[in-house]
Image (spheres, grey):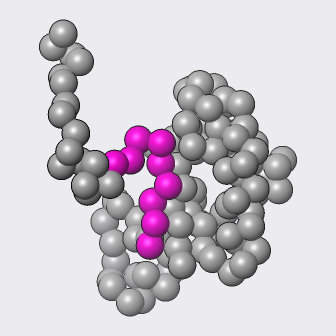
């Protein structure tokens, strides 16, 4: 399986543009999945030097990714070239909602308050 995993708020606490405190349980789970043969994609909005810093930071904890903000070549072969959203079986992100949660949730536009 392929897991697309976010950085800020997921693998580390939110401190953007700085790097937050590592979430060791998340890092260890990602390493375990990869050791079991699963594919990991670091899926983040970080670019340039901020992205390099995040990748380097995770390496100090022994976590490297098969892809960084890029498509799994197996998905490209199976489904064709993708768009900006990387193909994955699962997306791990602190901002996610399941489809049912989305239907059940009442949203308030905080920008208008």
The residue range painted magenta reads 89-97
Q: How many labels does the image show?
A: 0
Write the residue at 49% across / 85% down.
74
Going 50% across and 61% down the picture, which residue do you hit?
4
Q: Quadrant of the N terminus?
A: bottom right
| Residue 48 shows in this picture | no
Residue 93, percent across and down?
47, 48
The answer to whether 93 is drawn above or below residue 67 in the figure is above
The residue sitting at the bottom extreme is: 78
* Residue 72, above or below 11: below
> Could you tell me which quadrant the C terminus lies in?
top left
Name the one closer to the observer, 91 or 67: 91
- For the question of whether residue 7 can be seen, the reply is yes
- Relative to 56, 85 lies left or right: left
How would you classify the magenta stretch by its main secondary structure? Answer: loop
Q: In this view, does 83 lie to the left or right of 2?
A: left
């Amino acid at each position: 399986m392929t897991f697309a995993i976010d950085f800020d708020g997921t693998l580390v606490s939110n401190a953007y543009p700085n790097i937050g405190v590592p979430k060791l349980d998340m890092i260890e789970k990602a390493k375990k999945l990869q050791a079991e043969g699963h594919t990991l994609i670091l899926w983040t909005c970080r670019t340039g030097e901020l992205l390099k810093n995040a990748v380097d930071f995770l390496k100090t904890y022994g976590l490297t990714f098969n892809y960084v903000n890029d498509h799994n070549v197996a998905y490209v072969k199976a489904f064709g070239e993708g768009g900006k959203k990387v193909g994955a079986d699962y997306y791990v992100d602190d901002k996610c909602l399941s489809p049912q949660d989305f239907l059940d949730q009442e949203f308030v536009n905080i920008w208008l308050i």
